[in-house]
Amino acid sequence: MNEQTIKKILITGANGFIGNTLMRFYQHNNQAVVGVDLVGNGSDIVKGDIAEPDTIANLLEECDVIIHTAALVSNAMDDSDMWRVNVLATRNLIAAAKKHEVRRFVQISSIVAYGNAAQGELDEDQPVHADGGSYVLTKLASEHAVLAAQANSDIEVVIVRPGDAYGPGSRPWIIAPLEAIAKNQFMLPAKGEGFFRPIYIDDLVRGIVLAAEHPDAVGEIFNLSCEGYMSTKDYFAPHYQWLGKKGPMLVSTTLALRVAAIASKVANLMGNLNEASPATVSQLATKSWFSIKKAERILGWKPEITFDEGMKRSKQWASDKGLLGK
């Protein structure tokens, strides 16, 4: 099967961590690309609501590939909001993509689709499991919406499941931990022995780009993660060092779940969100990691940025953004 030239790419969630990095990559490589998000920038990111695809019908006519990164990433938001954005909007978008004869639809899902209870090395044949709250449920339900749309049409579908994507701009794995550590409000369940699967954003973007263009990617699901895993204690230790603090604070999962439940109740009473929720505690206590052999075999992809290099770049970015104090 010969590779097809991509005319123009549409990236949803173009203001987000993954979406915006993809935008910059394609622009740097002179690929025609346009972004869509709830807030536009007056140039390459158009204001639009993917839940109402008619608002971006002109973009769907122009583009032959969609990379769908838009999603609510949260372990604390209302179930109804998560379902509306992550599942129903995805269904509406791919239905519109079929209507406008978009050739390929790349769904950015997550390794959380495997659930928090799974253990050991997981490949793409591992059954998904709605174990871990609304985020887990809606990510795997969004995959179903995409696969169902493919079942009765010739639209090319690819699903990407990123590992724990970090790097400059990462809210869950760089910004939020630094904010919590600075306030002495960060702790690790499982005494820091949960498994973390860091994938630097540039490596992830390379994999997504390959998934969007490779002829043999059609109809496939890919884990894009690191090789193996590291402990959460080892992943978050640099954050403490950057702030000049001792840590991480290591506690039992039972204690972490109790603290998280109380904090979530207090946040709800005050009309706030507590992302350090029980679902987040369960996620940080997982004992699974992900095979990337399929992506290596079919896409010719593997991570290139070492953890030390990725953290060096992340620290510099955090310093430039004033996240490390004076």
Image (cartoon, rainbow, N blue to C red):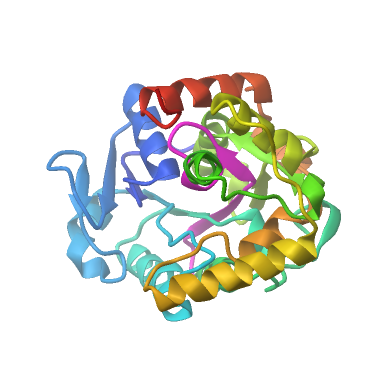
Image-quadrant location for residue 159 = bottom right
Give the vertical position of 102 relative to 32 (above or below): below
Q: Position of residue 50 (x, y in %)?
A: 30, 64
**Residue 274 vs residue 153, the one in the foreground:** 274
Q: From where the camera sits, is residue 125 visible?
A: yes
Query: What residue lies at 69% left-to-right and 70% top-to-bottom?
Result: 258
The C terminus sits in image quarter = top left
Residue stretch in magenta: 151-173
Relative side of 306 to 123, left or right: left
Q: Position of residue 49 (x, y in %)?
A: 25, 64
Relative side of 130 to 190, left or right: left
Query: What residue lies at 49% left-to-right and 46% top-to-bottom?
Result: 176
Q: Position of residue 153 (x, y in %)?
A: 48, 69
**Residue 92 vs residue 181, the one in the foreground:** 181
Q: From where the camera sits, is residue 147 visible?
A: no
Give the vertical position of 38 relative to 121 (above or below): below
Query: What residue lies at 27% left-to-right and 56% top-to-bottom?
Result: 60
Q: Residue furthest bottom?
A: 80
- Residue 164 within the magenta-colored segment of the rendering: yes
Relative side of 213 to 293, left or right: left
Relative side of 42 to 211, left or right: left
**Residue 125 vs residue 101, the one in the foreground:** 125
Give the vertical position of 50 relative to 41 (above or below): below
Q: Position of residue 213 (x, y in %)?
A: 50, 39
Query: What residue lies at 52% left-to-right and 32% top-to-bottom?
Result: 167
- Residue 168 within the magenta-colored segment of the rendering: yes
Q: Residue furthest left?
A: 42
Image-quadrant location for residue 129 = bottom right
Give the vertical position of 177 relative to 268 (above or below): above
